[in-house]
Image: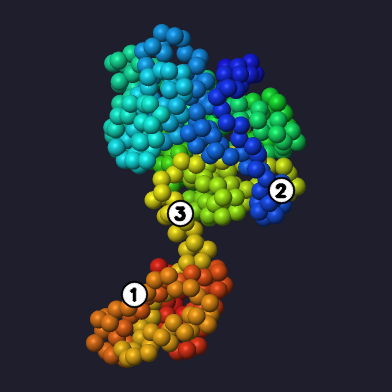
Amino acid sequence: MLSFDLFTNARQILAPVLNKTPLVYSRHFTQLTGNQVFFKPENLQLTGAYKVRGAFVKIARLPAEQKKKGLITASAGNHAQGVALAAQLQKLKATVVMPTTTPLVKVNNTKAYGATVILFGENYDEAYEHALELAHDKGMTFVHPFNDLDVASGQGTLAFEIIADLPDVDIIILPIGGGGLAAGVATLAKMLKPGIKIIGVEPVGAASMKLSVERGEVTSLDKVETIADGVAVKTPGDLVFPYVRENVDQIIAIEDFELIDAFLTVMETHKLIVENAGLLSVAALNHLGVKGKRVVSLLSGGNMDVITMASLVQHGLINRGRVFTFSVLLPDRPGELERIAHILAKQKGNIIRLEHNQFVSINRNMAVELKVTLEAFGHEHKDQIMHALIEKGYVAKVVDSTAVYD
């Protein structure tokens, strides 16, 4: 069981290994929410995520015979790198089964920590089943990403650090996937400070723990659909579930679009890169319904490929009205493009891209379609620019929107 001695031992095991991630005060979210908000940035941890904590503790506690047989796990991300590094630091061999769809950067990072990577299956579940088969056939020791109390005790050491750095903390917010992190942190935090409130956060499209707690038993989802792939778990762990049910006070479900906005805010205001799963605890700050509390949001990881990062930035800017595209039909005559450019310049709209198509119609009075992508200050500025076009007699519409300005 998850005892205080087990957590203390985990802290001792990890002491010479981990980076000590400091609490980061968020002036922005403090002003926005009316609570004193701090981040626990485990995106700055070894391997870029908290997962190395549980993996290292689990492996360190294994009997010598099991270590010699080799370690194996299945993961598409942070757990893979955590097991790989933990094995490397303890001079052991590790094999990681990853789905064939895993981004190359994550595959290469896992290999860089010394693990043998096997690409198998289209998703985590298929990779997981294959890893179990290999473990059985070759006698290797399987290191589960969340449904293991040794792993949970390693993840729980975060509570020691949070409460030591902020003894009067009122609320800890953390993401929930399979439940290992939530079980460990919530259980230890309640031991250290019984009055503390623990809030878990899941995406709406993968809220398996929320559903399980509501039903009082581990419940599987038919499917998961979320951009927060680090917590896209159909079935919570049965070993950790009782600790989550007992010690997590509330579970909030967050829509994916909120993670996009949170990514942009955290990157711009704190210069931190946080992956979608880690942003759940940031997005949840808008749903607390309390004021004047001392709140710590756990940023669980920051491993994100550049393509995903670029997509989040683009969608975030569009959502805020800071980048938008409009189209307008123009007469096919000299000077029309210059007229549009002059209107936009006067409104301080910064042109990013122009598409000028003269072949949309044979009607020379409305023969040219112009699409303009602009940088603006926000939705109010966007509307100001569009109304300026109306005043000059143009009928324009924002692309990918039902709004028509005329």
| Mark closer to the observer (3, 2) | 3
Q: What residue is shown at x 32% (from left), y 35% (from top)?
A: 99
Percent coordinates x, y for residue 237 in the rendering: 47, 27
| Distance from the alpha carbon under mark 3 to that under mark 1 | 24 Å
| Distance from the alpha carbon under mark 3 to that under mark 2 | 27 Å
For mark 2, give the secondary structure: loop
Q: Which residue is mark 2?
A: 35
The disc, 3 or 2, on the residue closer to the chain's N-terminal end is 2
Q: Is residue 360 left or right of 48 when viewed as pictured?
A: left
Percent coordinates x, y for residue 229 in the rendering: 43, 41
For mark 1, give the secondary structure: strand
Near-viewer residue (192 or 245): 192
The disc, 3 or 1, on the residue closer to the chain's N-terminal end is 3
Residue 53's mark? Answer: none
Q: What residue is shown at x 66% (from left), y 27% (from top)?
A: 160
Query: Can residue 315 be seen by looking at this rendering?
Result: yes
The disc, 1 or 2, on the residue closer to the chain's N-terminal end is 2
Near-viewer residue (136 or 333): 333
Residue 47 lies, with reference to residue 191, above or below; the image says below
For mark 3, give the secondary structure: helix
Residue 92 lies, with reference to residue 111, above or below; the image says above
Q: What residue is shown at x 45% (from left), y 54% (from top)?
A: 312
Q: Which residue is mark 3?
A: 312
| Mark closer to the observer (3, 1) | 1
Residue 319 lies, with reference to residue 25, above or below; the image says below
Q: Which residue is mark 1?
A: 355
Where is the N terminus found, in terms of image quarters? Answer: top right
Residue type at mark 2 is Asn
Residue type at mark 1 is Glu
Near-viewer residue (294 or 351): 351
Residue type at mark 3 is Leu
